[in-house]
Amino acid sequence: MLDDAKLLAAAPQEAMPLSGEPPAILVEGLSKRYGEVVAVEDLGFTVGRRRTVALLGPNGAGKTTTMAMLLGLLAPTSGTIRILGELMPKGRHKVLPRMNFTSPYVDLPQRLTVLQNLKVYAELYAVPRPKERIAALAAALDLEGFLNRPFGRLSAGQKTRVLLAKALINEPELLLLDEPTASLDPDTADQIRGHLEAYQARTHATVLLASHNMGEVERLAHHVLMLKQGRLVDQGSPADLLARYGRDDLEEVFLDIARDRRRPDGRESA
Ligand SMILES: Nc1ncnc2c1ncn2[C@@H]1O[C@H](COP(=O)(O)OP(=O)(O)OP(=O)(O)O)[C@@H](O)[C@H]1O
């Protein structure tokens, strides 16, 4: 039903950043090589607090690798990462409780029910009043019909919603979302986007979003980072990118960059 989105949307608007507050993410000279394969090369970007920033790029551009390094799941070949002001991986134990993620590549234990899985994560993150938190998430993300079913027996779309509930269980300040609406039907995907907007309005969380859905990016993102072959090739607000590439929608900008077919000034490439 996801109807708490309306309720939460009435929450206070984004607060002004406090002076001296470190950014949510600060990445400098970040590279990752797998033998001969250069997955990420000399990447640098900043994500300010309370922003939603989209990480875009064709298949294999390095989005998932970047997310994994931000989470401390993968060691960079070189470069530095600061999360909420803490140098990673040294400060990992300080920031991991304040962040969370979804990834299509990470599964939950298959034999545990949805409720058992969420209870385990609530305990791991020491969530206060876990029963109430799980009940609220189950209502908001429409999980109530399959709370007692083993995770392994859910459909892809149902799993996606459970993974999002897991990602929100500790009310993270920083949320890394790798294709959070892949495999969802258009109606459910739209409701999930509404829920994410409402979550951010209520908690002022920062979101880094990897997505291939350009409509989703135009709706949710304040800023876009365009990756190609592991490098940052352009960035800007969706409106700024549309204006610079002379396009009406972000999908066209994406194709211009992916196919090297138009320069940012709107002229065709030679
Ligand atoms: N474990 C690995 N060993 C070797 N190469 C890898 C490994 N993981 C990723 N790669 C390579 O690194 C590059 C970046 O992959 P990554 O999964 O980060 O891309 P992506 O932008 O998330 O792609 P997609 O949109 O398809 O999810 C690709 O060329 C991929 O083949």
Image (spheres, rainbow, N blue to C red):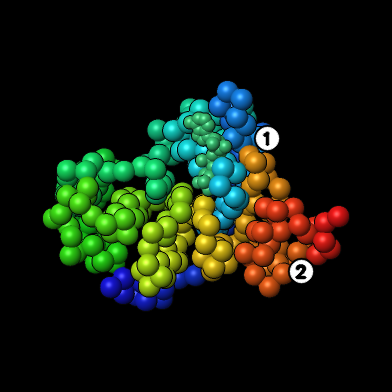
Q: Nearer the viewer, residue 76 or 126?
A: 76
Residue 264 appears left or right of 156: right
Question: Residue 256: horizontal and vertical position, in percent?
Answer: 71, 58
- Quadrant where the C terminus is found in the figure: bottom right
The amino acid pointed to by label 1 is Asp
- The residue lying at 39 percent from left, 43 percent from top is 105
Residue wearing tag 2: 246
Question: Residue 103: horizontal and vertical position, in percent?
Answer: 41, 47
**In the rendered view, would you say 74 is above or below 26?**
above
- The residue lying at 46 percent from left, 33 percent from top is 72
Question: Residue 152: horizontal and vertical position, in percent?
Answer: 22, 47
Q: CA distance from mark 1 to mark 2?
A: 28 Å
Residue 135 appears left or right of 81: left
Residue wearing tag 1: 42
- The residue lying at 51 percent from left, 56 percent from top is 211
Q: Nearer the viewer, residue 166 or 182?
A: 182
